[in-house]
């Protein structure tokens, strides 16, 4: 039975994961590629991409510059097995294409003659079934108005907002004269 | 003394009471008994004000005995939608939450004016919760059943008012109309309804829904009653900021004047299509009876409806914000979700809707330069079946509840006065036709309505409720 969480091994993995995070922030494609095991057996799943083998990972990195701002590690769990195997699980938040997101990452690391490499990895976005722009809007606006939105009421509220948005669209697109004022008094 | 108050109009009752063919107390007792006997089938009343009614009736009888004027509606029994304040009664507004409020300490202004006119209040009637409804399927009080076919809806949100009048439980009733809540029950129940000009009748002492669009008005089985009840409630009221500072303009003296000189047209385009066949047949029938050949159109009514929807959502959401914070779980679920979403409406949508309202008012004002009364359907279908969720509109299956107001919503959006005129001869269930005028021109509507009543095309008989 290998030793679980030998402190010196945990420290090694933590340092490597920190370095990986820095490479991501810098979009250092060379470094990011080097972290992965240079083998046809390596695999990496992104939020949308499924990459098999070191070559696919390498060409994906080159073609897709990562523009990440405000990436914050929220929680990280490292487990080491003996001196040559480890898993890293973490949750993080970041602003991706201007939209704040909450995501998860899992990595399996192995020690090779030339050092530690990631042998398998997976990134996913945390989603709820009703997630969308109006769900975000409802959460934020309700919070600003101190209007509690109970979880069981939320889907119906979001649905009504989506319906109202569809109803509002032709009104908002209608070309009213610039001088038309809001006038609530109705006399003939 | 064989006078039967069930089928009698308010003015017939007033006349019979005045000449002592019957007494106000006898009329009241007879109708209270009818309410009790039919309640299990109709579920129209939520509060019966027996003591009050008998006291009001005794006062009318005493006035007549003392040769004092008992008022134009002497002894006429009526009911109010349960959002009107009645002294000593909790104004529930169709909700569970408002049941915890203390009883009202005074009558709504409209009720006080009806009392002064000699009318007898028998109680408060069922409605859709907080008036945000078109079918009156109230989860707290139960659905109102249509007296003309008990498996059907009486319409909403003033469904109890429509059912009580159609069933002969009262001679008239009060309701409110924000997007169609008087005209829809009038259509589903086959009776007369009047939504006056926005600002004509005081709303004070009634629980609000949408300040910019709320109106009160009467239901009746005769045009004369519609006019007399409306006249009795007229007059400025400083307690309602929207109530116009205009002198009373009685219409009752003019309703027999005929409709010659009144320029009429059918509303075409948007209002001419989509509804079930009897709905459009009813408009044609009324147009034929009046000899109307002209058709006019209003520009982009579908955008007016969208704007009314957004103003409704936003203002009602704000109105209920405190209740949504404290007791969201106690609302009718679909109404709660609409109100919560409404409370989050972006300001830009609301303001653009109000700006559109200004612009559209100018367009519609132009139309009224060459026409006085417009004809349009009131509802896109006759009374739906309770529990029904969809119907066919323009060949497409659409959700029922949000679509019932398709023809009423653009009209109340401008606060135009409307009479809903019932037509019983186009299908198994009646439907109403909207008679629409320019602001403050109720008199033209009631003259046309009376002519339609005399012609026999528009009638509102008491429903024959099997015992």
Image (cartoon, rainbow, N blue to C red):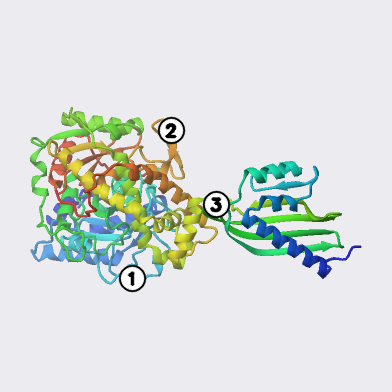
> Considering the numbered disc 2 on the image, is that residue within a helix, a strand or a loop?
strand
Residue B413 visible, this angle: no
Residue A177 visible, this angle: yes
Which numbered circle lies on residue A131? 3
2 and 1 marks on the same chain = yes
Marks 2 and 3, Cα distance to the nearest angstrom? 29 Å
A156 sits left or right of A112 in the view: left
> Considering the numbered disc 1 on the image, is that residue within a helix, a strand or a loop?
loop
2 and 3 marks on the same chain = no
Q: Where does label 1 land, which residue?
A: B103
Above-or-below relation of B361 to A12: above
Residue at the spot 74% in from the left edge and 61% down from the top edge: A16
| Circle 1 Cα neighbour tier, 10 Å, few/some/many (<14 / 14–19 / ≥20) | some
A27 sits left or right of B234 in the view: right
B170 sits left or right of A50 in the view: left
> Considering the numbered disc 3 on the image, is that residue within a helix, a strand or a loop?
loop
Q: Where does label 2 land, which residue?
A: B396
| Circle 2 Cα neighbour tier, 10 Å, few/some/many (<14 / 14–19 / ≥20) | few
The chain ID associated with circle 2 is: B
The chain ID associated with circle 1 is: B
Residue at the spot 71% in from the left edge and 45% down from the top edge: A57
Residue B397 pos. (x, y %): 45, 35
Residue B428 pos. (x, y %): 35, 34
Marks 2 and 1, Cα distance to the nearest angstrom? 46 Å
């Amino acid at each position: 039975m290998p030793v679980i969480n030998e402190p010196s091994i945990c420290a090694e993995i933590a340092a490597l994961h920190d370095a990986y995070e820095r490479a991501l922030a810098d979009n250092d494609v060379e470094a990011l590629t080097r972290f992965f095991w240079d083998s046809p057996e390596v695999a990496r799943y992104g939020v949308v991409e499924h990459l098999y083998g070191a070559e696919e990972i390498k060409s994906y990195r080159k073609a897709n510059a990562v523009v990440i701002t405000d990436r914050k590690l929220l929680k990280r769990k490292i487990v080491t097995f003996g001196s040559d195997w480890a898993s890293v699980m973490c949750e993080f938040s970041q602003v991706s294409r201007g939209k704040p997101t909450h995501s998860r990452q899992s990595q399996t690391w192995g020690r090779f003659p030339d050092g530690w490499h990631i042998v398998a990895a997976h990134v996913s976005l945390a989603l709820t079934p009703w997630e969308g722009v109006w769900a975000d809007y409802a959460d934020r606006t309700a919070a600003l108005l101190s209007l509690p939105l109970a979880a069981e009421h939320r889907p119906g509220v979001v649905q009504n907002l989506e319906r109202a948005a569809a109803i509002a669209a032709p009104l908002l697109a209608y070309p009213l004269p610039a001088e038309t004022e809001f006038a609530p008094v109705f006399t003939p | 003394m064989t006078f039967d108050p069930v089928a009698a109009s308010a003015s017939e009752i007033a006349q019979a009471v005045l000449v002592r063919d019957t007494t106000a107390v006898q009329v009241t007792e007879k109708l209270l008994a009818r309410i009790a006997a039919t309640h299990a089938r109709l579920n129209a009343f939520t509060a019966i004000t027996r003591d009050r009614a008998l006291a009001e009736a005794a006062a009318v009888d005493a006035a007549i005995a003392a040769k004092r004027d008992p008022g134009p509606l002497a002894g006429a029994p009526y009911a109010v939608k349960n959002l009107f304040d009645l002294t000593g009664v909790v104004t529930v507004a169709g909700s569970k939450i408002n049941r915890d409020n203390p009883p009202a300490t005074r009558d709504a202004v409209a009720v006080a004016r009806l009392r002064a006119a000699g009318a007898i209040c028998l109680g408060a009637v069922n409605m859709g919760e907080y008036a945000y409804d078109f079918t009156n399927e109230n989860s707290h009080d139960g659905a109102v059943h249509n007296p003309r076919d008990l498996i059907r809806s009486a319409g909403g949100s003033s469904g109890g008012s429509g059912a009580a009048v159609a069933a002969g439980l009262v001679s008239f009733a009060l309701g409110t109309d924000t997007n169609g809540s008087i005209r829809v029950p009038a259509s589903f129940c086959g009776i007369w309804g009047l939504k006056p000009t926005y600002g004509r009748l005081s709303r004070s002492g009634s629980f609000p829904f949408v300040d910019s669009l709320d109106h009160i008005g009467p239901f009746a089985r005769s045009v004369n009653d519609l006019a007399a009840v409306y006249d009795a409630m007229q007059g400025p009221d400083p307690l309602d900021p929207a109530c116009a500072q205009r002198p009373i303009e009685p219409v009752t003296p003019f309703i027999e004047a005929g409709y010659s000189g009144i320029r009429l047209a059918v509303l075409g385009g948007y209002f001419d299509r989509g509804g079930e066949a009897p709905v459009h047949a009813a408009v044609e029938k009324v147009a034929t009876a009046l000899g109307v050949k002209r058709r006019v159109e209003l520009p982009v009514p579908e955008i007016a409806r969208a704007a009314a929807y957004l103003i409704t959502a936003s203002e009602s959401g704000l109105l209920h914000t405190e209740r949504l914070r404290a007791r969201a779980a106690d609302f009718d679920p679909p109404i709660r979700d609409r109100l919560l979403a409404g409370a989050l409406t972006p300001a830009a949508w609301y303001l653009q809707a109000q700006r559109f309202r200004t612009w559209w008012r100018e367009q519609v004002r132009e139309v009224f330069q060459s026409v006085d009364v417009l004809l349009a359907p009131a509802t896109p279908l006759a009374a739906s079946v309770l529990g029904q969720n969809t119907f066919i509109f323009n060949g497409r299956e659409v959700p029922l509840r949000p679509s019932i107001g398709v023809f009423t919503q653009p009209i109340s959006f401008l606060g135009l006065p409307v009479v809903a005129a019932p037509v019983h001869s186009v299908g198994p269930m009646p439907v109403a036709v909207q008679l629409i005028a320019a602001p403050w021109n109720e008199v033209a509507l009631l003259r046309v309505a009376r002519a339609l009543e005399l012609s026999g095309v528009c009638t509102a008989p008491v429903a024959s409720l099997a015992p």
